[in-house]
Amino acid sequence: MNDQICRVQEVTLGRAVRALRIENDLLATTILLDKGADIYELIYKPKALDVLWKSPWGLKEPGRDPAGHAPNSEEAWLEHYAGGWQELFPNGGDACVYKGVELCFHGEASMIAWDYEVTQDDAKAVEVRLHARLRRSPFSIERWMRVEAGRPVLRLRGKVTNHGGEVMDYMWSHHPAFGAPFLSGACRIDTGAQTLVVDDAYAGTHNPLNLGARSSWPLAPSGSGLLDLSRVPAAHQRRDILAYFTDYETGWYALTNTELGVGVGLVWPQEVLPYAWFWQEMNASPGFPFYQNCYVMAIEPATSIPGQGLVTVMHKTGAHRTLAPGESAEMTLQAVFYESTSGVAHLSEDAAVTLKA
């Protein structure tokens, strides 16, 4: 009998989807190897609860689903979007033409296969290194993922490198999307951000926010007065919004289900990721791909805003990042589970949780 607390193993989801499972005594996560190294599952074991959203159309299985002929990269990305948590690089949001090639919607790194190697596998900890080389730009991307025995923490360390002979611009973010049964009207958002900026172009069909508005979190102006965005709408309360957290004292947020008594938080260095995109699709958008039948929310630590593609960011906000030939950039990000019915006052850089009274 294998009583090792920390484990890593390659598994198959469905009939043909290669994945890697990493776990300790408190959490388990599953990574899709052939599709962007997506974090498809993030499970809190004491409550057998996966906090990540799953799309109703599910995993696209190689050899079983038709290849399809999506007319653009956004449709292709959404067709392959099974839910979970994506890493978006070197583009975010709208596709754009940069240095003679189209950078696809949400970035090439989130669509291609990644390789992996196990760097530690014992009772105390498991760590894997995932890596890929992009084709449409001269970048490589690496991600180390680590769990340690007795800690409800998933640690990520990322690195991107410019292998080209010229300066390259980029955007880089993480896109964890949360869904039911964890996500509900009983969820509350706490964060170290001071300000919320509403996207100036995303009108949506059920967007109550004033486009381009800037306000102090958690209240935002709407057509019917100030709206408390720290309270997550229930599934029957249609809403679709895109906004951005900024002015972080420290880079963190926590999402607590006050009825289930469990939450998940993310913490990161705000000097590396000074923003977080805030997306809610609450059974609101008609037509492809959501058909008013998807209840999902994401808060996405990011280098750059707005989510309108790299070229627009370069011209509109200058919030993109740049790497010289041979230069690398790194980030760290930690996800932590906790139990609470009241929410979180603070997450420290080592993922220690201070609960609200």
Image (tube, rainbow, N blue to C red):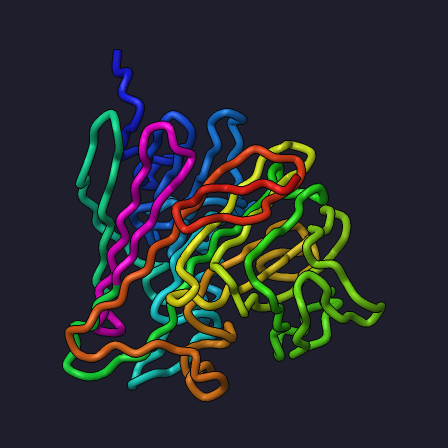
**Residue depicted at 25% across the width and 65% down the height:** 160
Was residue 171 drawn as part of the magenta stretch in this picture? Answer: no
Q: Is residue 74 left or right of residue 281?
A: left
Q: Of residues 337 and 198, which is closer to you in this image? A: 337
Q: Quadrant of residue 109?
A: bottom left
- The quarter of the picture where the C terminus appears is top right
Q: Quadrant of the N terminus?
A: top left
Instruction: Answer left or right for 66 relative to 184.
Output: left
Residue at 27% across, 53% down: 143
Q: Main secondary structure of the magenta part?
A: strand
Q: Residue 340: horizontal and vertical position, in percent?
A: 61, 35
Give the magenta-colored segment's residue range. Answer: 135-159
- Residue 130 percent across, percent down from the top left: 24, 50
Q: Is residue 9 visible?
A: no
- Residue 20 x, y percent position in the rendering: 30, 38
Q: Nearer the viewer, residue 336 or 134?
A: 336
- Residue lying at the far right in this picture: please name it: 224
The image position of residue 167, as x and y in percent, is 23, 83
The part of the image, by quadrant, that contains residue 31 is top left
Residue 186: tell me if it is visible.
yes
